[in-house]
Image (cartoon, grey):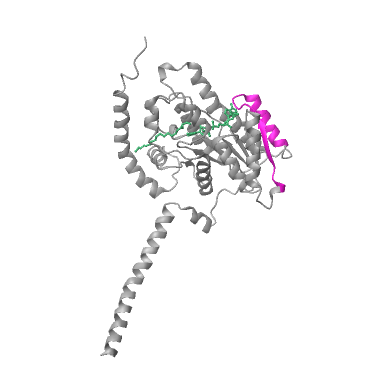
Amino acid sequence: MPFVDDILHLRADSVLSEKLLPLVFLFILFLLTISYLMGNSIWYKILGRNKFLPQGKHAYVTGGSKGLGKAIAKLLASKGAHVTIIARDKDHLQIALEEIKDAAKGREDYKNLIFNAISADVTNYEDSVRALNEACDLHNGRAPDFIFCCAGACKPGLFIEQDISEFESGMQLNYHGTLYTVHEGVKRMTRQRIKGKIVLVSSVLGVMSFIGFSQYAPTKYALRGLAETLRNELLLYDISVHCYFAGTIDSPGLQQENKTKPKITSEIEGDDVALSPDQAAKALYKSLCKGHFHITSDLGGNICRVASKGAVSPTNNFIVDSLLSAFAWIGGIPFRYMIDKKVKDSKSEYPIHD
Ligand SMILES: NC(=O)C1=CN([C@@H]2O[C@H](COP(=O)(O)OP(=O)(O)OC[C@H]3O[C@@H](n4cnc5c(N)ncnc54)[C@H](OP(=O)(O)O)[C@@H]3O)[C@@H](O)[C@H]2O)C=CC1
Ligand SMILES: CCCCCCCCCCCCCCCC(=O)[C@@H](N)CO
């Protein structure tokens, strides 16, 4: 009976859709909730909660001639920021400056943007002050809105084989080099009531460490301490502070440090997949848009970040970070077992020289 068949068919269809529709709806809702909880960038755009709008603002980037610093300088230029880069070598500064200009060339406001390179040694206090003054002069005395402290370096080696001067120069560049710029920069920003951003570049080795990094990890832990304090204190002036715990970045600096890196250190670090400087800069930029305080750009770094959150530091996402930290606390055990075993098994490769 075709008529009855039709009715049955229709009924089956509608029963199906009646049952399916809510399920599909729930599933979509579930996916949207997960993507929101995971902090997917699209939500920050849709909900207009972007916390980082560099267009028309002035970014001061130390270490801006190479690696991560150059990549972030280019990215900010492409978003319409005025950019000043600081480094010592003038030739590399010029090359980077051209690349930064190129990154902004497609923009309508390109002609209004101000790009500059200043040669200065950030480990020298007077030089840091001079560079900041020059950068302000180029903007009619106005202090930068954003300060990115990317200048830094790592000289890996075995603790007892390294000279004390290497530990000192590491701290001088990575910690004091950042401190001088931030101290001078923040003073200028506050006097001018500029509600800007300070971005400190630490490392995953600023929350965990292992053989070969005694010259470097403490300097990056120190930056974390500075970030923790300033995050709270600079609320006085509406200046936000961010700390980037970068994972391995395939930069000129990495090539350089690999020359003195003990084999065992490379083997352990090899578990970390290197990002290109552009990828790292993009990840940093996205996290700044989300307003994150502790920033990481890969899974290993993320795990280490949540495992060492600290008592009062804000999470990036309470639910996801808490769930991940349970995994991280457990995952840390086999990781430590692996690196400790590696070291103990390597005694013959690293004999003591009397
Ligand atoms: N590469 C990596 O795997 C990782 C890097 N990091 C951190 O990220 C930051 C950038 O690293 P990366 O891109 O590899 O570094 P690079 O060595 O590739 O670039 C370093 C930049 O800093 C400048 N610089 C170095 N010393 C001084 C100084 N005394 N005064 C002024 N400028 C200086 C360099 O220019 P010049 O020499 O001409 O002065 C260059 O522009 C560093 O703080 C590093 O510790 C963190 C995690 C991983
Ligand atoms: C559950 C726990 C799992 C942990 C896995 C993490 C593995 C991380 C390996 C080390 C990463 C080091 C990155 C920073 C490198 C750096 O700062 C230098 N290259 C300096 O330039």
Q: How many marks?
A: 0
Residue 320: give x, y in percent of width and height: 39, 49
Residue 297: give x, y in percent of width and height: 46, 42
What span is in magenta? 111-137
Q: Given the current orientation, which residue lies at the most extreme left position?
A: 1
Report the quarter where the N terminus lies.
bottom left
- Taking the magenta stretch, the answer to whether it contains residue 125 is yes
Specify the quarter for ligand 1.
top right
Report the quarter where the C terminus lies.
top left
- What residue is shown at x 47% (from left), y 34% (from top)? 203
- Left or right for 204, reference 191: left
Q: Quadrant of residue 137?
A: top right
Residue 161 appears in the rendering:
yes
Q: Given the current orientation, which residue lies at the most extreme top position?
A: 354
- From the viewer's perspective, is residue 25 above or below residue 132? below
Q: Name the residue nearer the viewer: 30 or 349.
A: 349
Q: Given the current orientation, which residue lies at the most extreme right position?
A: 140
Residue 276: give x, y in percent of width and height: 50, 40
- What residue is shown at x 37% (from left), y 26% (from top)? 264
- Taking the magenta stretch, the answer to whether it contains residue 240 is no
Q: Quadrant of residue 247?
A: top left
- What residue is shown at x 47% (from left), y 25% (from top)? 259
- From the viewer's perspective, is residue 333 above or below residue 352? below
- From the viewer's perspective, is residue 312 above or below residue 128? below
- Left or right for 182, reference 294: right
Residue 190 appears in the rendering:
no
Q: Quadrant of residue 325?
A: top left
Residue 353: give x, y in percent of width and height: 37, 11
